[in-house]
Image: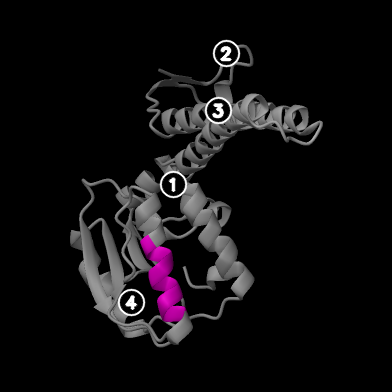
Amino acid sequence: MAGSPKRLGSIAYEIFLRHCIGDYVLFMDLQSDPLEVALAMLESCHNYDITIATRKSKPYNFAQKYTSKLFYKLLRAFSDGAYREEFSEFCVLSRRAINVLLRTQDDIKLLRFIDFDSTLKICEHPYTPTKIPKKSLLDSINLGLDMLFGRSYKLLRLGTGLCLGFAIFNVLYGLYIIISFYFMPHIAQGWTSTSSYMVLSNIGLFSMLCIFGEYMRIILLRQKDAIYEIIDEQSSVVLDYVEPNIKES
């Protein structure tokens, strides 16, 4: 599949993978991936499930280089995957790897960020890209945010932790208001009631945000780890409109 990264995304990947034919599929960008490297990968791919090209160096400028390093450090810090900066979208997938991709519940933004099954045999093929495809700053920011928030539940835990911290801070501030009311005679009129109302509102707001965030995190984790086993499937010609044609357990 040759093309531009702008045309690739979760829907485009899934549609293409479901309708592709053949035992192996090559993904490459004609603007940056050398054709001779693609031919060498196709020659050696028969012994592996995935043959992925690893970039020995990237023609980045100073800003792109350190922005890329910062992005990968944040991604490794807030997610469980061992993502490597040298991986690329230049790869050859076998039929078995394609089936794994179609079964996964992950949103396929980029192939190199997919957590492949550990049973798949992966071959790394080093190469040097001729150039980096041009992407707008807005597209890069949107893709980075999608990857960080879509592949990390630690950010949700960080948010709920901050909400809990703000709730505790407001509890302590409420104690300060009570102490000031009884032991500080020169307090402006109305300050205690106004501050108490603000503190109680903040405690309730941040506590509920913390609770909702933890419930969402648990639901997302359970949904991600859910395993479905198809025990019966009827032909689409014999669809039963009362019962589903696929039964899961």
**Farthest-out residue, right:** 189
Where's residue 139, x and y in %? 60, 68
Residue 152 has which mark? Answer: 1
**Is tag 1's residue or tag 4's residue first in the polypeptide sequence?**
4
What type is the residue that disc 3 sits on?
Answer: Ser
Q: Which residue is mark 4?
A: 38
What type is the residue that disc 2 sits on?
Answer: Glu
Q: Which residue is mark 3?
A: 236
Cα gap from disc 2 to disc 3, whole angstroms: 13 Å
Which SS class for mark 1?
A: loop
Which residue is pictured at 40% across the width and 26% down the height? 228
**Farthest-out residue, front:** 185
Tell me if label 2 and label 4 are in contact, CB under 8 Å. no
Where's residue 173, x and y in %? 59, 34
Q: Nearer the viewer, residue 73 or 165?
A: 165
Tell me if label 1 and label 3 are in contact, CB under 8 Å. no
**Is tag 2's residue or tag 4's residue first in the polypeptide sequence?**
4
**Is tag 2's residue or tag 3's residue first in the polypeptide sequence?**
3
